[in-house]
Image (spheres, rainbow, N blue to C red):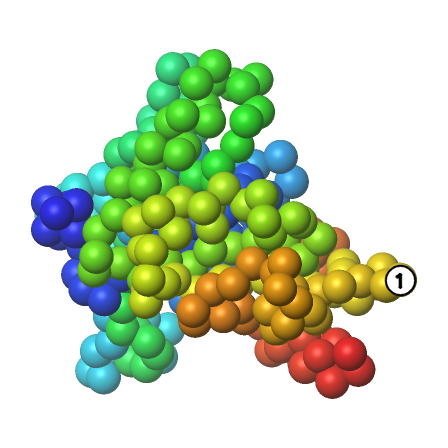
Amino acid sequence: CICQSMEIPIPGVVVVGEQSAGKSSVLENISGIKFPRAQNTCTRMPCVVQLITDHREGEDGYALVSMNPDFADAQRCKVDEVQTKITDLTEKLARGNSYISKTPINIRVVRNAGPQLSLIDLPGVTHNADKMSNIHDVTISLVEDYMKQDEMVILCVVPAMSDFGNAEVIKLARKHDPDGVRTLGVITKCDDAANVEASDILEKAMMSRPTDVRLSLGFHCVINHSQIALDKGQSREELRAKENELFEEH
């Protein structure tokens, strides 16, 4: 079991999607941790994030970042330093023929409140072979390595404007979770769909038409921080307010 061999505590939630689908943003909104999401960057190594609650810990908490799952060589850092450490390790280790690496970066965040679970951010499925000739095969294999574990909850991230029927991660989820008991769809960038005349995002999210992709656990709609909003320092609270306003209007 990959969870046991890599010492990933259960429950585990694996976040999968095509490149630039908004996976890291979804994970960031769940965990409260910032991930590298600047323009022209992408997840190139799995990030296994352990969220741990310790009521004795101070308000700010702390993080450990290491290539070793036991964190034996890790030094405490601030939670908002995790993003830089991920970037540094990625640039150091994911290069050349290993532009997409299967070796995970291990992250442990200890705070006095919040969810307690493990989140796994994986490189997005892509056909863009500019950096790596077999990148599609490598990203598919990596996604399946985590998806096939029965202990994993699968979050299939799909942008609102995409064709759900052709989403590779949904097809893979059906392969490894045919009954759909551990697969949840997350529709990102819903604000893009809201600005398009005659958008059918509501029908897709509600699975109301016979032709719509159906998941037993359904779809959850979200919006993401845009790069402009990130550059302006938009907070999670401001994003949630924008999200609530959008869904109330539509």
Residue drawn at x 33%, y 62% is 179
Looking at the image, which residue sits at the far front? 210
Along the horizontal axis of the image, is 22 left or right of 12?
A: right
Residue 101 at least partly seen: yes
Amino acid type shown at disc 1: Glu
| Residue at 35 percent of width and 47 percent of height | 175
In this view, 221 is above or below 113: above
Residue at (60% x, 69% y) in the render: 207
Quadrant of the frame with the C terminus: bottom right
- Give residue 165's position: percent from left, percent from top: 58, 49
- The x, y position of residue 26, in whole percent, is 51, 61
Q: Residues within 10 Å of mark 1 (few under 14, many from 20)?
A: few
**Can the viewer see residue 92 in this picture?**
no
> Position of 145 compared to 72: left or right?
right
Q: Quadrant of residue 138?
A: top left
Q: Considering depth in this image, is 57 or 200 the residue closer to the camera?
A: 200
Quick check: 162 above or below 218? above
Q: Residue at x 43, y 39 (%)?
A: 123
Corner quadrant of residue 55: bottom left
Which element type, helix, strand or loop, lies under badge 1? loop
How many discs mark residues in the rendered view?
Answer: 1
**Does residue 144 sit above or below 238 in this rendering?**
above
Residue that mark 1 sits on: 197
Q: Position of residue 8 (x, y in %)?
A: 18, 55
Q: Nearer the viewer, residue 27 or 236?
A: 27
Residue at the farthest right position: 197
Residue 137 picture location, percent across and down: 40, 25
Q: Is residue 76 left or right of residue 219?
A: left
